[in-house]
Image (spheres, rainbow, N blue to C red):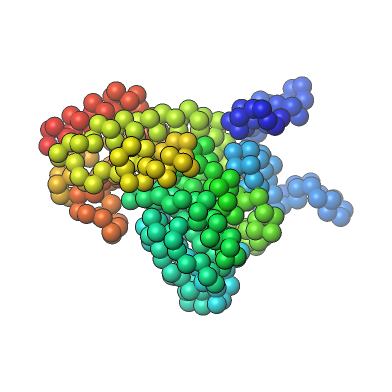
Amino acid sequence: MTDPYSPIARLLHHRTQGRRKGEPIALPIVASSTFDQPGDPDGTHFYGRNGNPTVEEVEAELGILEDAQCVLFPSGMAAIASVFSGHLRPGDRVLVHSDGYYNARALLAAQFEPMGVRMETVATADFASADFTGVKLALIETPSNPGLDVCDIAAVAGRAKAAGTILVADNTTATPLCQRPLDLGADVSIMADTKAMAGHSDILAGHVASRNPALIEPVKNWRRLAGALVSPFDAYLLHRGLETLELRVGRANSNALAIATALSGDPRVSGLRYPGLAGDPAHAIARRQMKGYGPIVSFCLKDRATSEAFIARHPLLAAATSFGGVHSSAECRIRWGDAVPEGFIRMACGIEPVGDLVAATLAALDAG
Ligand SMILES: *Cc1c(COP(=O)(O)O)cnc(C)c1O
């Protein structure tokens, strides 16, 4: 089934056409490390590190969302590691966001710089004017996390292409429903499926998507050789999350916009960022390239103690890291050493009814 149906309709029904009478409607979990394979290999399954039917079904679903070939990993970082490992060699220069997910930089510093890869960092908001000359690979993250700056993916992709740079976009904050980096010219899209894609804070997973076989092949090869395979059970939970992705993302995004709107102009709140707010510095670019603005709202209260107390007394906020789950959560990012003010809160909206979430947030502020 292809056009005219939406990716979500095709995802939900991608097994419908080929299904025979008596076969299960729900995706079977094939828990087997080895497969019947007498004689010479014939291209069918033979060992779990080389392929698992459940994992392949979920990769097909991700492929429908991304309109690209997808390779699934047991975490977002394993997906990022596969791209670095598959494509970076000694002497290569890599440009990476200075304000996005910090473990991407930590991985380059720990494993790749000692092997002769040169890392340079660029703020997300400056990527569209960065110099890509001689750069092998660039990693952008837009909206960035936790600061929620954005960069113009099409503009960055134009410069990267001209310089022969592989442009990799971490699309975790947006999801492929709200932003399609590959349509905008990125070569590779990466997701931490741990977040909104799986969506229930119960597994880690990640994937790499690309329309260029020459870029995806080394990623697949690395996965097979390094053994970074997701289990069929976790793949199933990701599949289960994907089936409700549109509903959850829609609610979480509208919750985030409602929270940002309720907080904007409040004298107790400073540094409010949400790319969906008309007054946000990122809004003009975000509106051009995004269909929804994600679940995360960032803002500051007076100081760390005030922010911790706000989170503690808010009845609908789990005091937890991560985002994209069904439960709203929040944390003071200073605790991880992010370059943010003491009172900086990253609030990740879940799927609670919007009226409850806004009322509880304002009540928690009022009680401060
Ligand atoms: C969480 C996250 C990752 C890493 O994903 P894990 O599944 O935790 O390894 C990468 N990028 C972004 C933007 C993230 O939020």
Which residue does the image show at 54% across and 64% down from the upper left? 137
5 relative to 198, above or below: above
Report x, y in % for residue 355: 29, 23
115 relative to 156, above or below: below
Report x, y in % for residue 117: 51, 74
Q: Is residue 72 left or right of residue 132?
A: right
Q: Is residue 75 left or right of residue 301?
A: right
Instruction: Give the image quarter of residue 293.
Output: top left
Which residue does the image show at 12% across and 33% down from the upper left? 367
Report x, y in % for residue 19: 74, 27
49, 245: nearer the viewer: 245
- The answer to whether residue 197 is seen in the rendering is no
Which residue does the image show at 38% across and 30% down from the upper left? 254
Which residue does the image show at 79% across and 47% down from the upper left? 44
Instruction: Give the image quarter of residue 277.
Output: top left
Q: Is residue 356 left or right of residue 18?
A: left
Instruction: Say how many tags the image has.
Output: 0
- The answer to whether residue 331 is seen in the rendering is yes
Q: Quadrant of the N terminus?
A: top right
Q: Quadrant of the C terminus?
A: top left
354, 114: nearer the viewer: 354
Report x, y in % for residue 360: 23, 28
299 relative to 358, above or below: below
351, 318: nearer the viewer: 351
Q: Is residue 300 left or right of residue 291?
A: left
